[in-house]
């Protein structure tokens, strides 16, 4: 196991989702120090902790452990959407539509 690479993938996704280490530790029910040790590759983790990390960060355990995706060309937004439940995808679709409408009206008003 390349713990440093595993930790780096976890940290990148945590930061991408906007979680502080403290917030992430609270969701995992561990100390921020333990999170830091995982992200730096100082310590490994149990299978239950790995599964919880995958759930919180919406990543597959394969990606966390090995850095492999089903399709290497998958965009981050697509990965996030794939990890959502049907209900969550429906909400995300509505939010994205609202965002795009707002951006379009912003373009129209600046012309």
Image: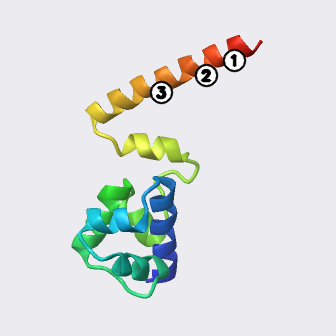
Q: Quadrant of the N terminus?
A: bottom left
Rendering coords of residue 25 (x, y %): 32, 69
Please tell me the numbered disc located at residue 107: 1
Alpha carbon separation for disc pair 3 and 1: 16 Å
Which numbered disc covers residue 96? Answer: 3
Examine the rendered structure and indicate whether residue 84 appears above or below residue 93.
below
Ranked by sequence position, the earlier of labels 2 and 3 is 3
Is residue 99 visible to us here? yes
Q: Residues within 10 Å of mark 2 (few under 14, many from 20)?
A: few
Mark 2 → mark 3, Cα distance in angstroms: 10 Å
Dot 3, crowdedness within 10 Å: few (<14), some or many (≥20)? few
Q: Would you say 109 lies left or right of 64 here?
A: right
**Dot 1 surroundings within 10 Å: few (below 14), some, or many (20 or more)?**
few
Above or below, 101 against 79 in this view is: above
Residue in the picture at 25% in, 74% down: 47
Question: Residue at horizontal 44%, vertical 88%?
Answer: 42
* Quarter of image, res 27: bottom left
Viewer-proximal residue, 33 or 48?
Answer: 33
Q: Is residue 98 above or below residue 71?
A: above
Look at 42% across and 78% down and name the residue there: 36
**Where in the figure is residue 105, as x and y percent of width and height?**
62, 14
Circles 3 and 1, Cβ within 8 Å, touching? The answer is: no
81 to the left or right of 16:
left
Q: Nearer the viewer, mark 3 or mark 1?
A: 1
Give the secondary structure at mark 3: helix
- Locate the C terminus by quadrant: top right
Which residue corresponds to mark 2? 103
Distance CA(mark 2)–CA(mark 1): 6 Å
């Amino acid at each position: 196991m390349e713990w440093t690479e595993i930790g780096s993938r976890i940290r990148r996704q945590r930061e991408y989702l906007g979680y502080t280490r403290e917030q992430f530790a609270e969701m995992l029910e561990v100390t921020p120090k333990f999170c830091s040790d995982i992200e730096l590759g100082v310590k490994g983790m149990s299978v239950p902790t790995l599964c919880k990390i995958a759930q919180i960060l919406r990543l597959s355990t394969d990606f966390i452990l090995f850095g492999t995706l089903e399709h290497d060309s998958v965009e981050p937004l697509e990965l996030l959407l794939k990890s959502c439940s049907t209900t969550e995808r429906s909400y995300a679709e509505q939010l994205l539509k609202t965002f795009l409408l707002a951006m379009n009206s912003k373009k129209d008003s600046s012309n």
